[in-house]
Amino acid sequence: MSLKTEPILEVSHVKKYFPVKSSFLKKTVGNVQAVENVSVDVREGETLGVVGESGCGKSTFGRTVLGLDTLTEGSIKFRGEEIGGLSDRQLKKYKKEMQMIFQDPYASLNPRQRVGEALEEAFIIHTKLSKAERVQRVKDLLKEVGLKEEHAERYPHEFSGGQRQRIGIARAVSLNPSLIVCDEAVSALDVSVQAQIIKLLKELQHSHQLTYLFISHDLGVVRHICDRVLVMYLGATMELAPAEELFANPLHPYTQALLSAIPRPVPGRKKERIKLQGDLPNPANYPSGCPFHTRCPLAHERCRVEVPEWREVQPDHFVACHEV
């Protein structure tokens, strides 16, 4: 796949803060900086991976892009049109084009609603299809994701975790979107089922011309499915590169530490794990300078006071580090 296609999504200097309220009078006394000045383009037809430790802002970034979390600052453009900060009503016309696959498919399904009814809802809201046409589209969707027509009459608790995720995927592709945010879409599944779901996602990407924003902490899965990878730490971007380049030549100290944790059982080769000291800082007490300086083995005084510039150090390889 070419990585030089036009961007379908342009994210520029995006910030998402959550207010911290005092227990007395409920006044805002600070902010949790969940996403901090993120800029990235998502190219049409690609799979862009977003990785980092738990709490680094990956999921909040994905939700903010889709308008599920309100944008604090910055710009989000979809096919050249500004959508950042739009109300739910204004976003409605974009909902068909942008969908999400959640980590826990059971939590995103109504336990009292049959699967067929859940899948039919999107057609009721966004199309003028007749009842018979909607029912037929539901049957077609179920078959497309590897389920049976009769599954439409069952309730969510009657399915396995992998089957529920197939239902979630069916709902995401039902309106023929262009962009799907996959938020830890395979992390709750065992390895064999993960492989089946990844294969399904690839098949759907090809047949529906989909673009994926693939959020995951599983670097093995990311390496297998993604074209480019964005590394986040404490809500900020550390590194962005084509997947092969990133895994072969990580430049940022945080990326190097992340990749060193991937098990590579190669006979006769010893791999040294890079262990980071300390825990992820509290985003409600955001560090000055480079957000990684409190744990970085290369940190010096400049890192503590000056935010590193996000710059292209090699063709299509971006990094935010004073030492690179």
Image: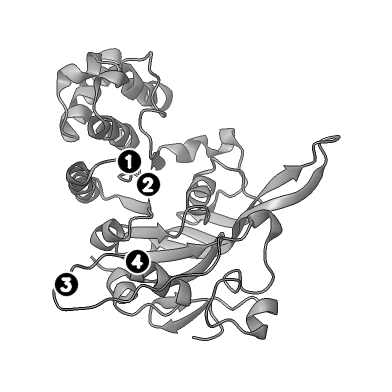
Q: Earlier in the sequence, mark 2 or mark 4?
A: 2
Residue 30: x and y in percent read 76, 51
Amino acid on which disc 1 is placed: Ala
Report the amino acid beneath label 4: Ala
Q: Secondary structure at mark 4?
A: loop
What amino acid is at disc 3?
A: Val
Residue drawn 17% across the image and 44% down it:
192
Residue drawn 35% across the image and 47% down it: 178
Residue identified by numbered label 4: 261
N-terminal-most mark, 2 or 3: 2
Asked if residue 128 is positioned above or below residue 165 in the image, the reply reads above
Q: Which residue is mark 1?
A: 188
Q: Which residue is mark 2?
A: 184
Q: Which residue is mark 3?
A: 266
Q: Earlier in the sequence, mark 4 or mark 1?
A: 1
The reply to whether dot 2 and dot 3 touch (C-beta < 8 Å) is no
Task: Please report whichever mark, 1 or 3, sits nearer to the chain's N-terminal start.
Answer: 1
Q: CA distance from mark 4 to mark 3?
A: 14 Å
For image coordinates 56% across by 84% down, the residue present is 322
